[in-house]
C-alpha cells in the first residue's frame, strides 16, 4: 500500500500531463485542418460548382455555367467521342425550357443528385425537364434542383439554406444508392468531415494506424461499398438517415408535402441479380417511419440488364430510362397539384 500511496500522485500528475498534451495536439490538429481548408477554398475553381463555405452542403451549381462534355470511349474507329451538354440558369438550376401557363403556378422542386440533374443527358432529357413537358398546360412549374455529388445530408442542407428561393409547393426527392456517401466534389469543411468524432486527432490516428474497422464518413472521405455504408451501425447510414429526417422536418414545418422516389443503381442491374434490393427496402421503411410517401422505381427496370438502361461509356441512366422513371413521378405530382 505504501508504494501505491507514494506512486499515486505521480501517476495522477502523469495522467494530467498526458491529457493536457493530447488536448494541445488536438487543438493544433484542428487549427491545421482549418487552415488547410481555408487555403483549399481560396484556390478552388470549377466550371460547374460554386463553393458555399460554412454550410453542410458545401457547394452549389454555378449560375450561368455551360459546357459540352465528351463521353470517353464512345468514339467509333476514326471518329470522335459522343458529347452531351448542360446549361445552368441564372438561379443556379439546370435549365428547363418548359414554362408554366399559369400566373401563379404550383411549384414542384426536384431535389437529388446526378440522377435528378441528368448527368450525361441533354437539358431537355433530364427527368425534371421531361416532367415539365409531361405536365405542360396543367399550371405546374418544375425546378431541377439536382446537384451532382450531393448526399442526402447535403440535399437537406441545401434545401434549408435556399428554401425561400426554391419556394416549393411540393418537394420531390430522388434517392439514389450512393446517397449515403459523403460528397467529394469540392473541399469538405473539417467540422463536417469529422462530425461524428469527439476527437478529430484520435479518429485520424486510428485510420493511419489501421486500428479502424473501415473508414468512417467523418474520416478521410474514402469510398466504401454501398452495402457496407448501409449496414447496421455504419456512420454513413446514420448520416443518411439524419439527412432524410432533416428534410422531412423542414418540409413538415413549412406545410409543404415531400414525396420520395428510390432510383435503382442501374449500372448494377445484371442477369445475375441486383445487389441493392435490401437498400431499397430500408429506404422505403425509413419513408414510412418519417411519414414521407416513398415509391420504389426498381420494379420498372428490374427485368432488364444495365446495357439497355445506361449512357454508353458513362453509367448514368439514359434518356429513355429517365423518361420511364418520370411516369410515376408525374402521377404523384398530379395527385398533389390543385385541380
Image (cartoon, rainbow, N blue to C red):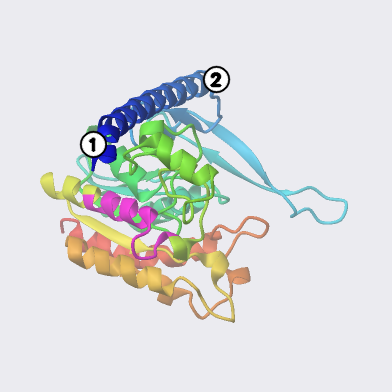
- Residue at x 38%, y 58% (from the top left corner): 234
In which quadrant will I find the N terminus?
top left
Query: In the rendered image, which residue does mark 2 sit on?
Result: 43
Q: SS for tag 2?
A: helix
Image side of residue 268 versus residue 94, left or right:
right
| Residue 69 in view | yes
Query: In the rendered image, which residue does mark 1 sit on?
Result: 5
- Residue at x 34%, y 42% (from the top left corner): 197
Residue 160: x %, y % from top left: 24, 38
Give the magenta-colored segment's residue range.
229-245
Name the foreground residue: 65 vs 238. 238
- Residue at x 18%, y 45% (from the top left corner): 250
Name the foreground residue: 215 vs 85. 215
Dominant secondary-structure state across the stretch colored magenta: helix
234 falls in the magenta region: yes
- Where 101 sits versus 265, above or below? above
Residue 182: x %, y % from top left: 43, 46
64 falls in the magenta region: no
Residue 81: x %, y % from top left: 75, 49
Q: SS for tag 1?
A: helix
| Residue 165 in view | no
Tell me the CA gap for discs 1 and 2. 58 Å
Q: Residues within 10 Å of mark 1 (few under 14, many from 20)?
A: few
Q: Quadrant of residue 253?
A: top left
Residue 195: x %, y % from top left: 34, 40
For marks 1 and 2, the one nearer the N-term is: 1
In which quadrant will I find the C terminus?
bottom left
Asked if marks 1 and 2 touch (Cβ < 8 Å), the reply is: no
Q: Residues within 10 Å of mark 2 (few under 14, many from 20)?
A: few
Amino acid at each position: 500500500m505504501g508504494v501505491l500511496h507514494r506512486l499515486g500522485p505521480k501517476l495522477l500528475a502523469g495522467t494530467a500531463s498526458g491529457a493536457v498534451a493530447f488536448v494541445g495536439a488536438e487543438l493544433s490538429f484542428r487549427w491545421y485542418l482549418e487552415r488547410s481548408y481555408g487555403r483549399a477554398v481560396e484556390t478552388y475553381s470549377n466550371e460547374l460548382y460554386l463553393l458555399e463555405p460554412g454550410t453542410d452542403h458545401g457547394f452549389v451549381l454555378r449560375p450561368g455555367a455551360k459546357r459540352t462534355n465528351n463521353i470517353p470511349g464512345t468514339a467509333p474507329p476514326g471518329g470522335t467521342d459522343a458529347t452531351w451538354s448542360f446549361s445552368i440558369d441564372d438561379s443556379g438550376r439546370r435549365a428547363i425550357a418548359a414554362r408554366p401557363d399559369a400566373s401563379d403556378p404550383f411549384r414542384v422542386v426536384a431535389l437529388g443528385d446526378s440522377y435528378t440533374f441528368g448527368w450525361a443527358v441533354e437539358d431537355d432529357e433530364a427527368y425534371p425537364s421531361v416532367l415539365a413537358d409531361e405536365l405542360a398546360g396543367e399550371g405546374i412549374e418544375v425546378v431541377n434542383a439536382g446537384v451532382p455529388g450531393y448526399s442526402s445530408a447535403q440535399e437537406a442542407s441545401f434545401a434549408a439554406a435556399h428554401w425561400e428561393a426554391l419556394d416549393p409547393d411540393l418537394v420531390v426527392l430522388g434517392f439514389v444508392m450512393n446517397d449515403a456517401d459523403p460528397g467529394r466534389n469540392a473541399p469538405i469543411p473539417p467540422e463536417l468531415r469529422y462530425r461524428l468524432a469527439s476527437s478529430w486527432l484520435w479518429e485520424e490516428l486510428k485510420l493511419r494506424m489501421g486500428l479502424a474497422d473501415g473508414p468512417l464518413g467523418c474520416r478521410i472521405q474514402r469510398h466504401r461499398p454501398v452495402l457496407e455504408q448501409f449496414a447496421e451501425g455504419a456512420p454513413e447510414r446514420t448520416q443518411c438517415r439524419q439527412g432524410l429526417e432533416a428534410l422531412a422536418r423542414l418540409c413538415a414545418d413549412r406545410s409543404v408535402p415531400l414525396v420520395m422516389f428510390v432510383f435503382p443503381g442501374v449500372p448494377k442491374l445484371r442477369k445475375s441479380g441486383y445487389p441493392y434490393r435490401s437498400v431499397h427496402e430500408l429506404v422505403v421503411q425509413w419513408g414510412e417511419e418519417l411519414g414521407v410517401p416513398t415509391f420504389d422505381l426498381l420494379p420498372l427496370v428490374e427485368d432488364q440488364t444495365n446495357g439497355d438502361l445506361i449512357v454508353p461509356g458513362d453509367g448514368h441512366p439514359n434518356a429513355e430510362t429517365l423518361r420511364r422513371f418520370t411516369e410515376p413521378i408525374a402521377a404523384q405530382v398530379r395527385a398533389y397539384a390543385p385541380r
